[in-house]
Every structure is written in structure tokens, then in C-alpha cells.
Image (cartoon, grey):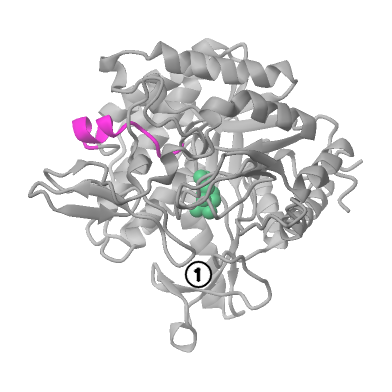
């Protein structure tokens, strides 16, 4: 057998993308609530009202302009308001997860349900109870909840009150929230992840029109990493056996040519994208290349002794990561077309295919990344997201023949199997968007990742009925055979 017998085969969703019930149970609004549905051609937008009453729009992660406030408009359909309705259907959904044979399930605790208006507004016991019920229901079926604390969904209250993560008050607020979760759920949840894809925020520094934003983004990330480190310490104070991991958006990066300049550019891309955060959280200090990376944006940072101590003492117990695609980098910008990023060009790799959204499908890149992570950090690894966003069709006989999704997972699991056989200490594999949900990047319901279909579209039409796709029984077989039967 290639996989250890306690290998964690899982499925993953998130609160803001799946729960819906955006204004129930004492929950306060989060930024994503104000987003529409984009398309395969472009990301979603977040809408707000400017101080002069006009309508404004921005990308996720951006901040409100001075004097603006979030508001809903009648002509926009907000897909996250209903999501997959998991808030109301979790019992039936978990029954299906158990039928499939999941060993673990990952979702997030919505901060906006626990402390809707920060610590000052007090704990929302209804929210605390909701998650206790969800975790208990999972345990009832022997499914381990592995829970993420933060997925870009802090209450907008924090942006309104503190201006967001640049303000160090957010560190205390987050640690208070995390500590309540560790304490309340210590008998139910033994493994946590702090910030989902913490490194993604820095990508905002390369967006068109982002000039001048880099210093703030580097400070936000720094505060989040300090908050994560303090939370690891807080968890261990509650119970030393609780394990807390970080969560980094994974990428494998190839040079487009053997030109040494391309090879170095590709390696540097990986350092900046992945290792800047992963090194800090796993090894307890910023990597030696940190000044070089920040310097690209003209950013310098003084780190206080107190923060250095927290980072050193609060290293993550394991490394969680997501993986969807790889990148191909070149310095030969005049010879190719691609996305300009940090002075290099990210091009389409001709050796691999892509999804309908242009995400390049690369199972060997997954294996490559597993080895890089294993060699570099030497701690347990958990793949917490991997999946294919696709348009699904219900055939006349009611079946959803998502052979493309089966093929995607089969190839990634096969590549991962090889990595495990070659010594990579992987704890588990997690299918992202296991239950259809709202896409984070585009806000679409129609970009589906699930093995369980949810009847809801981008326009808000649908019964929310669940339906097993062909991939459901395929993954059931994979888990039952502990990854031996991938046919
Ligand atoms: C990851 C996020 O980046 O990618 C998820 O953690 C997200 O929240 C997933 O849904 C897939 O991205 P998208 O944009 O297709 O939803």
C-alpha cells in the first residue's frame, strides 16, 4: 500500500462560499457578500456607495475609498447570500459525506458569526452553537473536522472601525477569535489552519493600478503572520496536542527556456509567491531573500523584536497548501505573449492543457510541489485544496457525467501517490468545493468543483436540491481502497 492507513481523504468548502444565510443567526456582513457573479472572462466585482452617492466597484481584497460604505443594489444578484445553503442543509450534506466515506472535512468558521462586531460587540452564542452542531454531526459519522479560521471573510465592521489588517488591533482581534474557537471546540477539532492562502494577498501588488499599495499589503501580511503565530501559541496553551497549520496557495514554477536567466527568474518567482510566507510561518523568521522581494516594490520593513519572537515561537505544526495550476516564467518578454508580473512574463505552457477558465492542469506540477515542500520544511504536509472548476451538465437520464473531473483527480492522486512512495510525508488529500459552491474568484455558482451537485445557478435560479455526480462514486471507491483503485 502506498498511502498510510490513516491517510486523510477529504473534502473542503468554506463558510462564505457555501453557507448562505448571510443575515441569519446573528452574522454580520463580510466583503464577499457585496460581490456579484463574474464570468470565465473576468473576476467578480464588489459594490459600494461613494460619499457622493454614486456607485463604486472594486476587486476583492481592495479597501473602500474614503467616505464610501458597502451597500446592496437591487439590480445585482449576490450569489453568496444563498451560496449552497449549507447553513440549513448541513445535516443532510454530512450524511452524504459519510456515505461517500470522507475521512476528514474542511470548512471555515465564519468570524462574522462568532464575533460579528469584534470583541467589543461580544460573542454571538448562536454562531458558536452552529459550528458546535456542525462539528458534532461530522464526529457522529467518524469524519474529522479540520477547520480553517480565516478565509478573507472578516466582518466589514473591522474595515469600518480599524481600516482593516494594516491596523495592529486586528492581531488582537484575530487571536481572541481563534482562542475562542480552540477553547470552545477543543474536544471536537484537533487540527486547525490559520489563514487560508495567506500569500495570495500580495498578488494585489501586481494588479494594474496598484501602484503605491505594496507597502500596505506587506504590512497586512506581516500582521496576519504575527496573528497566526500568536494563535499557534494560544492553541498550544489551550491544549499542547492541538495542531495548527498554515495554509499557502501552492504553485510550481517552470522556466520557459533553459536560459539561466529564466531558470533564476522561475526560482525567484517561487520564492516570492510561496516561500516568503511559508518560510516565515514554518521556520519562524523571514527568509534571507525577503529584502530583495520587498525591495522590488520599494518597500522596506522594520520588524520589532516582539514580532520576531512571536514568529519564532509560533511556527506552524504542519503545512497546509492548495494546488490548482503551475506557472511558466520567462525573461524573453519580447518573444512571447503572457501576463507581466514583477518584471517577468508568465506564459501559457504548451505541454499541458487548461480548464475553461484558463487554469493550466498539471498533475506533475503537484508532485513537484510536494517534493519542494517536503525537502524545504521537513514537517507533515496536508493538501487542503485541489480541484477542477468546470461547467457541468445534467443529462436526460438525470446523471452528471463529470468524467473530466474524475480524470483531473485521478491524475493528481496518481502523481501524489508517486510522491508519497518517494518519501513525501503527506497526511492527506482534499477535494476542493466538494459540494458545489460559489467560486471565490468569479462569484459564479456555474463554475463547479463539486462531487455533489447543488441546483443553483448564477442568476439565483434553482431548488438547491443535491445530486451525486459520477465523481461521487469514483471518489468513494478511491477512499475505500485507500488510493489503490483509481480506475
Ligand atoms: C482557492 C480558494 O484559491 O481557490 C477557494 O481558497 C477558491 O476559496 C478556490 O474557491 C478556487 O478558486 P475559484 O476562483 O475558482 O473559486
Please give the range of residues in magenta.
151-163
Where is 29 relative to 388, above or below? Answer: above
- Please tell me whether mark 1 sits on a helix, a strand or a loop: helix
Q: Is residue 28 left or right of residue 382?
A: left
Q: In which quadrant of the rendered view does residue 147 lie?
A: top right
What is the x, y in percent for residue 159?
A: 25, 36
- Is residue 282 positioned above or below 46 on the image? above
Residue at 58% across, 28% down: 89
Q: Is residue 154 magenta?
A: yes
Residue 16 spot, x, y in % from top left: 45, 36
Q: Nearer the viewer, residue 430 or 433?
A: 433
Mark 1: C-beta under 8 Å from nearest atom of ligand 1: no
Dot 1 corresponds to which residue? 265
Mark 1 Cα-neighbour bin, 10 Å: few <14, some 14–19, many ≥20: many
Looking at the image, residue 49 lies above or below residue 114: below
Q: Nearer the viewer, residue 162 or 380?
A: 162
Q: Percent from the top left, x then y, of residue 201?
A: 39, 49
Residue 153 screen position, x and y as percent: 39, 36
Amino acid at each position: 500500500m502506498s498511502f498510510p492507513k490513516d491517510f486523510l481523504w477529504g473534502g473542503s468548502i468554506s463558510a462564505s462560499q457555501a453557507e448562505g444565510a448571510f443575515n441569519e443567526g446573528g452574522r454580520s456582513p463580510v466583503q464577499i457578500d457585496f460581490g456579484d457573479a463574474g464570468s470565465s472572462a473576468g473576476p467578480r466585482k464588489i459594490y459600494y456607495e461613494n460619499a457622493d452617492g454614486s456607485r463604486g466597484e472594486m476587486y476583492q481584497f481592495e479597501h473602500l475609498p474614503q467616505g464610501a460604505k458597502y451597500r446592496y443594489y437591487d439590480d445585482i444578484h449576490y450569489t453568496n447570500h444563498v451560496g449552497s445553503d449549507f447553513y440549513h442543509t448541513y445535516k443532510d450534506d454530512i450524511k452524504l459525506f459519510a456515505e461517500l466515506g470522507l475521512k476528514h472535512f474542511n470548512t471555515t468558521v465564519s468570524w462574522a458569526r462568532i464575533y460579528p462586531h469584534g470583541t467589543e460587540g461580544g460573542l454571538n452564542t448562536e454562531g458558536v452553537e452552529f459550528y458546535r452542531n456542525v462539528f458534532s454531526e461530522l464526529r457522529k459519522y467518524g469524519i474529522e473536522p479540520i477547520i480553517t479560521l480565516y478565509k478573507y471573510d472578516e466582518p466589514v465592521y473591522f474595515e469600518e472601525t480599524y481600516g482593516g489588517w494594516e491596523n495592529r488591533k486586528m492581531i488582537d482581534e484575530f487571536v481572541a477569535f481563534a482562542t475562542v474557537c480552540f477553547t470552545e471546540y477543543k474536544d471536537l477539532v484537533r487540527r486547525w489552519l490559520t489563514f487560508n492562502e495567506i500569500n495570495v494577498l500580495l498578488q494585489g501588488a501586481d494588479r494594474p493600478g496598484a501602484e503605491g499599495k505594496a507597502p500596505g499589503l506587506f504590512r497586512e501580511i506581516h500582521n496576519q503572520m504575527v496573528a497566526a503565530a500568536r494563535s499557534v501559541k494560544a492553541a498550544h496553551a489551550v491544549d499542547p496536542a492541538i495542531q495548527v497549520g498554515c495554509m499557502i496557495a501552492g504553485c510550481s514554477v517552470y522556466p520557459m527556456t533553459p536560459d539561466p536567466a529564466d531558470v533564476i527568474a522561475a526560482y525567484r518567482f517561487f520564492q516570492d509567491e510561496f516561500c516568503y510566507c511559508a518560510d516565515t510561518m514554518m521556520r519562524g523568521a523571514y527568509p534571507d531573500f525577503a529584502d530583495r522581494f520587498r525591495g522590488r516594490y520599494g518597500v522596506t520593513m522594520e520588524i520589532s523584536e516582539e514580532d520576531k519572537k512571536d514568529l519564532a515561537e509560533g511556527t506552524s505544526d504542519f503545512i497546509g497548501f492548495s494546488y490548482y495550476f503551475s506557472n511558466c516564467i520567462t525573461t524573453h518578454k519580447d518573444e512571447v505573449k503572457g501576463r507581466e508580473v514583477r518584471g517577468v512574463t508568465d506564459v501559457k505552457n504548451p505541454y499541458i492543457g487548461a480548464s475553461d477558465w484558463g487554469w493550466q492542469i498539471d498533475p506533475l506540477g503537484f508532485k513537484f510541489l510536494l517534493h519542494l515542500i517536503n525537502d524545504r520544511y521537513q514537517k507533515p504536509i496536508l493538501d487542503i485544496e485541489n480541484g477542477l472548476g468546470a461547467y457541468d451538465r445534467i443529462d436526460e437520464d438525470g446523471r452528471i457525467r463529470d468524467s473530466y473531473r474524475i480524470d483531473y483527480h485521478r491524475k493528481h492522486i496518481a502523481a501524489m501517490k508517486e510522491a508519497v512512495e518517494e518519501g513525501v510525508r503527506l497526511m492527506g488529500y482534499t477535494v476542493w468545493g466538494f459540494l458545489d459552491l460559489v467560486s471565490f474568484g468569479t462569484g459564479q455558482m456555474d463554475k463547479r468543483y463539486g462531487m455533489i451537485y447543488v441546483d443553483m445557478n448564477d442568476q439565483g435560479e434553482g431548488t438547491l436540491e443535491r445530486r451525486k455526480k459520477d465523481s461521487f462514486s469514483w471518489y468513494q471507491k478511491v477512499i475505500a481502497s485507500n488510493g489503490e483503485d483509481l480506475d
